[in-house]
């Protein structure tokens, strides 16, 4: 199958592309290789993907309407997986505009191209952060989600809304995926596991927000990849109305929202303890207040994904941490 994949040099995009290439699919990756975090890490990921004969790469920004639409229309994919985005909750407080441009205008450009080409399935990354200030856990796709706490979360929520209206007007099958704190080898340097590991190894103080009194539904990358791939041939379809319990399928459009999480909430201080045990070093802790925009608890309900694909994530965070550390040590020597 021909798949156009944005954000292919990113953490999730790299793993997903590699998995799909191993399965024999043809991938056109698209990424700006921006310097939000270490570009060398992105280059190393891209170098691995470039070894596959069926991988093609285009460097560009999704905000560039002409570039993205010509790239997509020339490649003629059956499926588009759109992961490119300006990620990160905290940076969105410092530099909100880039989120509006990349995540809203950029995503709009992808949706518009998908419509022109009439693709079988457009899959777009959203985020668990759209649940915002919701108190009821676990988070379910049909829960109200109107209280985003950061611009990052707001841009993700906005793309869900734009995608729905396009899906309605053009009958374009779109699945929005709400990922929950994804971690693992080749992970993002701006995220907790990477920052803690780096700090502990280099004997530097690690910042622990809300004094560690937070819970995260840490989801291992392989589980996310399997979750996404299990959905490729399951585009939303109005004939599925009333087929699944608590379905988020729109009553008027081939549009569905799905959580991809591990369905376990892990206490941040326990997470750090496991890391210390594995590294055999005590962390120097810098307890900080809750950061603006941060959510205290995330926990997914993934029953809908399970009903549709039979798939449920299964990697325990202790195993996931071990795998991350083994990659980290070999990559950074
Ligand atoms: N990792 C997580 O825990 C998590 C959680 C929820 C949602 N998400 C979403 O999943 C997607 C992938 O996340 P990730 O963790 O792999 O992030 P990432 O930053 O590692 O990957 C994103 C990639 O997109 C590229 N990119 C950014 N802006 C671009 C633009 N304007 N044009 C073209 N390319 C651009 C970057 O260079 C990067 O390689 C994102 O949409 C993110 O918001 C991730």
Image (tube, rainbow, N blue to C red):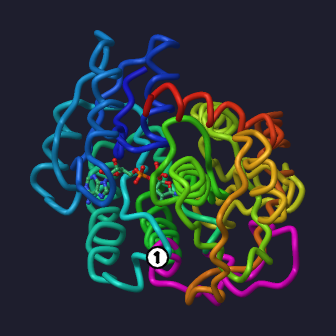
Tell me the chief SS of the magenta region: loop
Pinpoint residue 257: horizontal percent, then vertical percent: 65, 60
Q: Is residue 136 magenta?
A: yes
Out of 319 and 63, give the one closest to the viewer: 319
What segment carries the magenta color?
Answer: 130-156
Rendered residue at 77%/58% (across/down): 217
Residue 86, percent across and down?
36, 64
The picture places residue 218, in percent across and down from the top left corner, at 73, 53
Residue wearing tag 1: 152
Q: Quadrant of the C terminus?
A: top left
Q: Secondary structure at mark 1?
A: helix
Give me the residue at 64% from left, 57% from top.
181
Q: Is residue 8 above or below residue 203?
A: above
Which of 158 and 11 lies nearest the eye of the viewer? 11
Quadrant in the rendering for residue 312:
top right
Of 38 and 8, nearer the camera is: 38
Looking at the rendering, the quadrant in which ligand 1 lies is bottom left
Q: Is any part of residue 254 visible from this angle?
A: no
In the picture, the quarter occupied by the N terminus is top left
| Residue furthest left in the image | 66
Left or right: 195 with respect to 333?
Answer: right
Magenta residue check for 51: no
Q: Does mark 1 have its CB less than 8 Å from ligand 1?
A: yes
């Amino acid at each position: 199958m021909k798949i156009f994949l944005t954000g292919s040099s990113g953490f999730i995009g790299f793993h997903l592309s590699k998995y799909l290439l191993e399965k024999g699919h043809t991938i056109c990756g698209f990424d700006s290789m921006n310097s939000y975090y270490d570009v060398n890490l992105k280059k190393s990921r891209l170098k691995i993907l470039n070894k596959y004969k069926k991988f093609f790469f285009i460097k560009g920004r999704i905000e560039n309407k002409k570039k993205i639409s010509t790239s997509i229309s020339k490649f003629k994919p059956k499926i588009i997986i759109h992961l490119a985005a300006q990620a990160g909750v905290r940076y969105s407080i410092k530099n909100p505009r880039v989120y509006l441009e990349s995540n809203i205008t950029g995503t709009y450009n992808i949706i518009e191209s998908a419509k022109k080409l009439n693709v079988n399935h457009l899959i777009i990354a959203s985020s668990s952060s759209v649940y915002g200030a919701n108190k009821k856990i676990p988070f379910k796709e049909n829960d109200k989600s109107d209280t985003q706490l950061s611009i990052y979360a707001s841009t993700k929520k906005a793309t869900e809304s734009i995608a729905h209206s396009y899906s309605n007007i053009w009958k374009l099958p779109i699945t929005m995926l709400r990922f929950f704190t994804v971690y693992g080898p080749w992970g993002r340097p701006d995220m907790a596991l990477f920052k803690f590991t780096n700090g502990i190894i280099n004997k530097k103080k690690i910042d622990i927000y809300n004094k560690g009194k937070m819970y995260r539904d840490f989801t291992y990358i392989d589980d996310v990849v399997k979750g996404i791939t299990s959905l490729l041939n399951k585009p939303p379809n109005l004939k599925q109305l009333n087929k699944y319990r608590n379905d988020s399928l729109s009553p008027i459009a081939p549009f569905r929202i799905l959580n991809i999480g591990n369905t376990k909430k892990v206490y941040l201080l326990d997470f750090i303890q496991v890391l210390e045990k594995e590294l055999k070093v005590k962390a120097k802790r810098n307890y900080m207040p809750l950061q603006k925009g941060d959510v205290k608890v995330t926990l997914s309900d993934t029953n809908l994904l399970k009903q549709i694909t039979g798939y449920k994530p299964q990697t325990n965070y202790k195993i996931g941490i071990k795998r991350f550390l083994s990659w980290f040590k070999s990559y950074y020597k």
